[in-house]
Image (cartoon, rainbow, N blue to C red):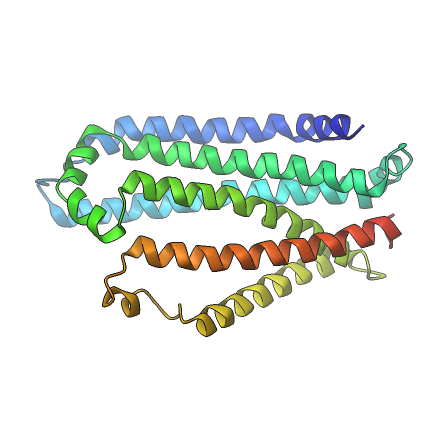
Amino acid sequence: MLGKLIKYDLNSSGKLFLLLHGIFLIFCVFIRFIYMNRLDLIAPVDEKMLVVSLLLFFTLFTVFVSALMFYTQMQIAFRYYRNLFSREGYLSWTLPVSGIQHLWAKIISGCIFMAADTLIVAAGILILATGKNIRDAYSLIANETTRELGMTLGEFSLMLLILCLASCICSVVMVYFCINIGQLFPGHRVLCAVAAYFITSTVIQIGSLIILFISGYFPGYEFFAAEGATAADFMIRIYAISGGISIVVTVAMYIATHYMMKKKINLI
């Protein structure tokens, strides 16, 4: 039954998800040929105009990517709330399925969407950044970049991608946790869920900064450069601590969500 629930979630939201992300990839291919491939990064005719155009492009691209990722997260939250806590939730809870099975189906389908979103965005960036002119320009600073990072740019990018994929689990669980928190209130549950999300995010960020400060990894990399550490060494340490924090927080939020789902506190 768990597999059927996951399949239902994927089919219900998959069409619009694929449409929007397909448009994103087509946009990246289009921009690659009409803009990126025409850039002269080694000997530009007008350096000021090049910088302005790149800043404008990266700003618009960042907004586009942020909107796409925001849509994915909102889609996951909307499906969870609608399927379990709205009028449609009445039908969901009449199925011969436990609350925990509903929760795991949503977690798995949500992680699939988040991971797919991350991979598609990464593919779009790869499409834009692998033109011959960009590769030629990067070759001029490749040795310095590799020396500073402690690894090649490709290896560094792969590490970031893996970390982003791993963070999908924490993001999904936190969304569901906050929605469940909202259900504990007698009214304005959606607003309470949004407030819970911002409060939870703020607490996690402040707690993480405190732990990093206590561990000696805050405020920055410059304190480690003098010891011969590379940027990659510093970031690996930071991500290791952040990853440990994320695991603890994710487990704690899952346990709380599991408890609320099992006890069916204001679920319908």
The residue at the far front in this view is 227
Figure check: 94 above or below 148: above
Residue at image location 43% in from the left, 41% down from the top:
161
- Residue 150 pos. (x, y %): 26, 50
- Residue 104 pos. (x, y %): 73, 39
Query: Which residue is at the front of the view, 236 or 64?
Result: 236
- Residue 98 pos. (x, y %): 86, 39
- Residue 69 pos. (x, y %): 52, 43
Number of on-image labels: 0
Query: Which residue is at the front of the view, 89 or 257?
Result: 257
Figure check: 141 above or below 3: below
Residue at image location 35% in from the left, 59% down from the top:
234
Quadrant where the image shows the N terminus: top right
Figure check: 50 above or below 5: below
Residue at image location 74% in from the left, 27% down from the top:
3
Residue at image location 38% in from the left, 39% down from the top:
158
